[in-house]
Structures are given as structure tokens and as C-alpha cells.
Amino acid sequence: MSAEDAVLSDYETSQILLLCSISESKGAPVPISEITLLVPRLTKERLLKAWNAKNELSSKYSIVNDFIVPHTGKKEITFAEDYKQSISNLSVARQFLRLCGHSWLECLCVSGSTSYFSARKEDDIDLFCITKSGYTWIFLTKALILARLFRWINKNASELTISLVMDRIYALIDFSTPKDPLYARDALTTVEIFGSSFYRNLLMRSKWMEDIYPLLYKRKVSEHSPTAEPRTRISDQRSAGKAVTLLNVFLYFVIGRYILLRAWLANRRLSKLRKRGAIFRVRIGPRYLVYESAQYLALKRVYYQLGRLIKLDRGISLAEG
């Protein structure tokens, strides 16, 4: 490695600082392996050699056993605890899937802190579901009822939260439309409990994510063998029958209004308790349900800065070429 290769550019330093600040706000350490996946052309060897030379990094963060942590951050033992909790949460999600069944599902994923393997005991298990066309609210109604039953049976398990549901038609449009780096990172970090082949093919039609995180994208779409599950073609759309469509719309109006009312009451309570970061908004439609917390929206703005850095670097690379 040349002396020049052992120096971090200002662009790389800015990206690392942003990623560290994001993880610090969530109380999680940053694995070096994750940094090298998210920052183009950065290797672990370069990062380790150049770390102490960059005062912006070494004055705020330390490298402990291949993790980047703030100087006042968590101890090594906590990393193992968070990982163990995340593995436990994935096991709980698989148990719920067995109870819920997958006849109306294309895929079920775990997102949030569990998918980043930084879950704490008090964290919810965030579920992301893609249903068959026209079954969004039919599946959601069943899942909400069974989630309450599951919680009653498994009192010691972390609570399940169905934070994002969409049907396959909505998913195809939503995933293939270019969005911000946070959306891409979450999509490429989810852990599939069911339907990994479907999800992989969905990502392969979302090439804009590769432009933002080329290494992470490549790892995600290639981590599952194409023969692991029967291959599902996204283009094979079967319209739901008229009775299913009518039931789905009916449940959208009934259960959807119930969810909006509960969200309004919950946000009033959180506001009185001055827990502003926990306040959330709910977006619903016949084909989707999305929960977004104030903390998530704030994180989205930080990732917007990351997106600007990526665009700037891309412009520099083009100029150099």
C-alpha cells in the first residue's frame, strides 16, 4: 500500500463521520465491515492505517475489536449482548410466521435494530411484509389479531410491531422508484424470514440502490442461492378476485380508521410525556400501511446529506475520468 493510499480523503472522512453519528444516535456501534460496504473504494486496511492521522475521526471515535465506537460509548460486552438479542428476535419472528402462516404473503422480513444486529431488550421487533396482490388489509387484520395472541402466549419475548405492509404491485412501484440513501440501506439490510427469492428479485429490479451502495447491493442480491426457493417472477401478477378486492377495501376503511385513531391517541400521550422522538405518523392506502416515527424522519434528513456527498463524489469521479 502506497503512502497516498493510506490517507483518507475529505469525502471519505465526511461519510464515515455521518455514518458514525447516525449509529451513535441509535446507541449502536458501527462495524468496520459495514463502513467498507457503504463507503466506495474504502478497505479495512486503509481505514486502520489512516485512522489516527485523521483528527476528526480519532478525537471522537475509537476502534475496538473491528467496531467504531464513541469515546464515551458502549463496552465490548454490549456488542455481544445486542447481537444475541437480535438473534433471539429473529427466532421470535420465525415463530410468529409459523403461527400466522404465509398463504397470503410474498415475503416477510425483519427490519429496524434487529436487522442491524444492534437490538436491545426493550426494542420492538419490526416486521416488513409484502402480501400477494390485493391482500394487504386481509393479511394485516389477521396478523394484528395473531400478534396480540402471540404476545399473550410469549410474555417474555420482545413485542412484534408490523411497521410496514404493502402488496406486490405497490412494492414493485415503490422499490423501483429512486429514493433516499436511508430507504436503500434499510431495504438492503432487512433479514428475510420468508420469501427471500421474491425479495431478491425485487431488489434486482431496483438498480438505483446499487448506485448508492454498490458493495452492499452486490452482497445482498447474491447472498441467497437462486435455487434456495422456487423462483418468483415479479411480473407474474394475478389479480385478486372481486370478493377478495371488496373485502380488502372494506377492511382498509374499517381497520385503517381504527389504526389512525389509535395512532392519534398514542401521539397525544407521547406528546404529553414529551417523548417527541417517539411520535409517529401513519400513511395508509388500500395497498399499503407505513409507520414513520419522528426519529426516523430526522434520520432521513441526515441520510439526505449522505446522498449529497455520494452525488458529489460521483461528479468528482466523472470529472477525473
Image (cartoon, rainbow, N blue to C red):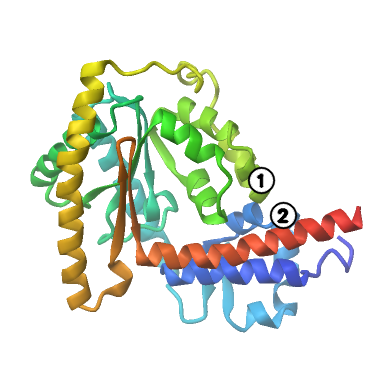
Split into 4 quadrants, where in the image is the N terminus?
Answer: bottom right
Q: Crowding at label 2, few (<14), some or many (≥20) Cα neighbours within 10 Å?
A: some
User: Does the rendering let one see residue 81?
Assistant: yes
Horizontally, residue 204 falls left or right of residue 168, namely right
The residue tagged 2 is 40
Q: Amino acid at mark 1?
A: Leu
3 w.r.t. 143: above or below: below
Taking the spot 51% from the left edge, 66% from the top edge, the residue there is: 301
19 w.r.t. 287: above or below: below
214 w.r.t. 263: above or below: above
Q: Amino acid at mark 2?
A: Pro
Spatial CA span between label 2 and label 1: 8 Å
The residue tagged 1 is 215
Horizontally, residue 320 falls left or right of residue 111, namely right
32 w.r.t. 191: above or below: below
The kind of secondary structure element at disc 2 is: loop
